[in-house]
Amino acid sequence: MIRQLLPVSALLFGSALLLFAGGIHGLILPLRGAQEGFGATSLGLLGTGWAVGYVAGCYFVPRIVGSVGHIRAFGVMCAFAAVSILLQALLVSAEFWIPVRAVSGFCFAGAAMIVESWLSDRASPQTRGTIFGIYTMVNLAAMTAGQMVIALGSVAGFMFFAVGAIVYILALVPTALSTSHTPAPLTSVNLNLPLLWRNSPVAVVAVFLVGISNASFGTLAAVYAGGVGLPLTTIALFASIPILAGAASQVPIGYLSDRMDRRKVLVGAAALALVADLGFIILAPQDRMTNLILVAAFGAAIYALYPIIVAHANDHAPEGTSIQVSGGLLMVFGIGSIAGPLVAGLMMSLAGSQGLFMTTIAAHVVMIIYTLWRIMQRAAVPENEKGSFKITMPARGSTPETVALSEGEEEAEELEEAMDAEDAAEEAAQARSTKTDPTE
């Protein structure tokens, strides 16, 4: 294991720093904005701006890297991400923060794609699955740590903005000092809606709705928690626990989805999210424990939806198109992520803190109804034709390069099987040769 990780340890460290800074950046803005009196609509537009920049980064960064190379492009992305968080500390204004947040979304997508491209290039087919799994765990831990560090101080000052900027800059050091050769060009994915729709209408509709739900929660969870009177330490937990619960829930949910119609598992997970939605609205909890229990159930459901959808879409994908299909779904998710925070912000302006979960209820109800209707229209994929469920980090932190790195696991497994078969054939041939050798 250590021998596999040493060649990519610097890149994993750089990615961890990037996600740590991103965790700080993503939580400090809604908290400070709410403290400064920004309306819920403006706070929602911060998430919309970030999603616009992120989708644009996934589309344009491969071209930038093709022109100037990985190291220069990565340095620029980290530098502009640091500049963006410092500018937001210097000029506290919703009208200014929204476009600057789009810049940071662009930079974050670009930096993540470059790190993932480098990891993919440095990994051998035999180690790719291990590296992708460790990369996912490192990113989840770093993102959670970045959010939790907010509980150590006050959001009113300059400190957390400065810490975020420092860590963004430190993230470029491992790649800047790398002596490895330039990786292959970045994976570029174009959105082909007709192909995605022919492949699986459920996947297209559901991933758009998941984008609305998850991005709304990711952007405005801290605003909701502050609105119901939770202290800063609990707000940090309220933002972090769902991500960890979602990572843990993917193991049993993946097991189920590999053994039954994935659409039924999708309905079940969306129903669990709906129960949590209703719990927030009906109970209107003000206490710490009830909020954390409900948000853990909510996170366990919503962060398992995306990998179920991708696995279902790939079950129907023609051979050789899985990366294109998964990357296209990521872009549809991004479009939903643009709309979600804006809608949720408007709902919170009209209905108060519970407007967040009114938005997610609508997304989950539509998802359940449409998926049940499609179950009646189309038979399930036979079990022997299904691919395998892959545990992934929240899609809001994924890029087309993540898809390529993840999909490479299957290629590694196929290569390993082919090598085992080849070794077995060689052993059998040697055995036959030994039997017929006249000297024996």
Image (tube, rainbow, N blue to C red):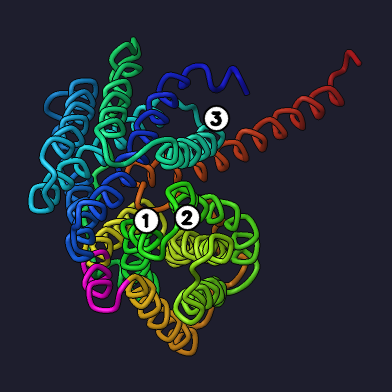
The answer to whether residue 200 is seen in the rendering is: no
Dot 2: what SS? helix
Where residue 165 sits, quadrant-wise, is top left
The residue tagged 2 is 238
Q: Is residue 342 magenta?
A: yes
Q: Quadrant of the N terminus?
A: top right
Distance, label 2 to label 3, CA atoms, is 35 Å
Q: Is tag 2's residue or tag 1's residue first in the polypeptide sequence?
A: 1
Where residue 86 sits, quadrant-wise, is top left
Total marks shown come to 3
The magenta-colored residue range is: 341-352
Assess whether mark 1 and mark 2 are in contact (beta carbons under 8 angstroms). Answer: yes
Residue 344 in percent (x, y) is at: 27, 70
Q: Residues within 10 Å of mark 2 (few under 14, many from 20)?
A: many
Mark seen at residue 127: 3
The residue tagged 1 is 222
Residue at point 47%, 42% (across, down) = 144
Amino acid beneath label 1? Ala
Q: Residues within 10 Å of mark 1 (few under 14, many from 20)?
A: many
Vertical order, 175 against 43 (above or below): above
Q: Residues within 10 Å of mark 3 (few under 14, many from 20)?
A: some
Amino acid beneath label 2? Phe
